[in-house]
Amino acid sequence: MKPEGQDRAIAAAMKGQYRAASASPGPDCADVETVAAFLDRTLSSNERTRWEAHIAGCPYCTSLLGTAARAAHAAPRDVPARTRWWLLPALSSIVAATTTALFLYVRAMNNRVAATPVELAEKSADLAYRASEAKPEEAARPPAKEAAPTEARDQLERYSEPREVLKKAKPEREYRELAKSDVQSETAGSEVRNESASVGAGANAPRAQSDSDMVAAAPASAPAIGGAIGGVANVAESQDEKRASRVPASLRWAAEITTPDGAVRWRVGKGGAIEHFSAGNVWAAQSSGVRSDLSAGSAPSAGVCWVVGRHGIVLRTTDDEHWEKRASPVTIDLTAVSAESSEAATVTAADGHRYATTDGGASWHQL
Amino acid sequence: MANDQLPALRQKHSASIAAAFQRARSVFPEIDEGAFAEALASSVGGWTAKLPASASGLEIADHIRSLHVEDFALALLCRRGDSRAWEKLIDEHRSALYVSARALTRDEAVARELADGLWAELYGLGDTAGPRRSLLEYFHGRSSLKTWLRAVLAQRFIDYRRSLARDKRFGTATENEAEVAAADDGPPDPTRVPYLQAFNQALSASIAQLDARERVRLNLYYVQDLTLKEIGRLMNEYESSVSRRLLRSRKRLRASVEQALRRDHNFDGEQIRLCYAYAMESWSADIGRLFAEK
């Protein structure tokens, strides 16, 4: 008989022995409180060892523990939903239609931004020359209203609103690094933009917005003008801000947390959303039990993770899965957490004050 | 611990109890400090009474610190009839308890009856005579209230199953005869019973050689049909570790059972194979009948 068959025979025999044995509680059997504490892993190590030894030989306690575990681990998603088979054709059609529309849209964008190689090369050379000549402060100055549109000024006008964006000047080195990655995708968009300017539509925020949208959809195949372009350095930084401001509200993840060994990750974000990534290679949603936005986390060891968020929310898991809300040191937003273990952690509030706990978040003291 | 020793315990561990009260009050500002301290001391006293040896002051302080005092406070307020506390209890646990009951039995009616019965006991409607006593009096905060409710639900479910089994054992004669007739398919094999007995003895002896955690793991997997993930959560192990250890235990059991059959009963390979086959046939039929509701 194969080993699998032998295993099945052993399993069947064990079940038979279990059924034959008395399944009534004895005087030494665990009470419900003990079984619940066993499940929650709140027994001391001595107690746990003692009860494991008893449960190992007690059919009643084994049955109670197993049944309680099944009940405790059941979650609303564990209840099998009725499969709505009639939805499948409709969903398939929707997916197919969406995919086709997306393909056509991207294709249309490719066609709009395409230009002959010669034209593109000329434009690239011209932009590179202008960039090497322009100074950052000149690029940041808003263009004169009556001045004839130029390529560099068009790019500035596109980002002239909001002007506050240009005030958040990053060091020039960072500008150049941003420019390298961003302006490459701007090239194709600049073609259309310049054409629009020549028509006399005037550079204003709505058109700039649409140009930015086109640039965002520009294919990677658009020829790169390359290099650090000082004149458009501010533009690159503004482009980054613009792109960030267009990020859909549905983008939920504020932080990604990883255990020291890198085996387990979580991501947290808006509306109390938590997802968990492990050996299964998929992100799986977990229930945080809260609706407040979560902002940061810290995972000091396998199975342990602390998360903080708005309104003083502090969450902790000690088994990779179940999240429990801990006491809050403050009611204002918490912006950071640093954890050393499942018991010790330090959180930072939005007002800069820091609070530490050594009892797993049951109590906090200000540092 | 006797009731007259509780004031001494309260005094000795007043700092720990006060800290626990602060934690509870952060969630339930309306909770009365005196009532909380008294209930907590009584709970701790009950815990120390069940220990095989007396607990030191440090152990008691650690125990108080480990309690789920927020849930303990909620249970205390519910017992005292606080309507807001009851609303909170129902909001947080009622629907989830139904889900848990459904996880234990596929029968919707039985699940609902189990859950509703439990809620009635929580509210104290179980006893018709005498003052109303809530089941929440037995919650001492050693676990979360959520887990404790599920453990109680599990206990009620096991009692229900045992009552079903009793009904079957004492069923009508015609029912029993029908079962026997259904199980009886041909003339009895003379080697079957002694082989099964030998196999049973060898298996029991082999299982007894395993350590407690291995036996618990095997029982939960083979007898209680928990998944690897559920066992991992319960035993605080990774799913892969549970799988690996079960595999190792199964190998040891197979080797040990075979060795016992050869040594104690002088069985050869073919006889051992028959032992396994008879075990599969015999207990599978029994399991099919008795676990039909699963």
Image: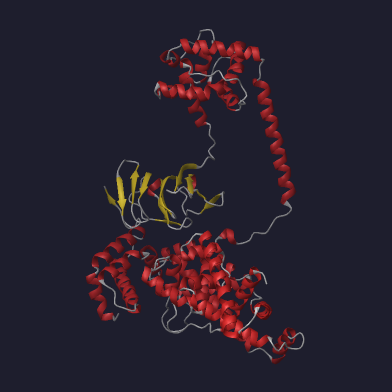
Picture colour scheme: secondary structure
Residue extending farthest to the right is: B186
Work out whether residue A257 or residue A6 is closer to the camera in this orientation and state it: A6
- Nearest the camera: A129 or A242? A129
Residue A354 is situated, as x and y percent measured from the top left of the image, at 30, 45
**Residue A75 location, quadrant:** bottom right
| Whole-percent x, y for residue A366 in the image | 27, 49
**At which x and y percent is residue A140?**
43, 16
Residue at image position (30%, 50%) is A356
Q: Is residue B225 visible?
A: yes
Which quadrant of the figure has residue A293?
top left
**Left or right of residue A324: residue A189:** right
In the depicted structure, whether residue A261 falls above or below residue A10: above
**Total tally of numbered discs in the picture:** 0
Residue A237 showing in the rendered view: no
User: Residue at image x 61%, y 78%?
Assistant: A13
In the rendered image, the quadrant that contains the C terminus of chain B is bottom right
Picture quadrant of residue B266: bottom right
Note whether A238 is above or below A87 in the view shown: above
Q: Position of residue A179 (x, y in %)?
A: 49, 22
User: What quarter of the picture does the N terminus of chain B occupy?
Assistant: bottom left
Direction bottom: furthest residue? B173
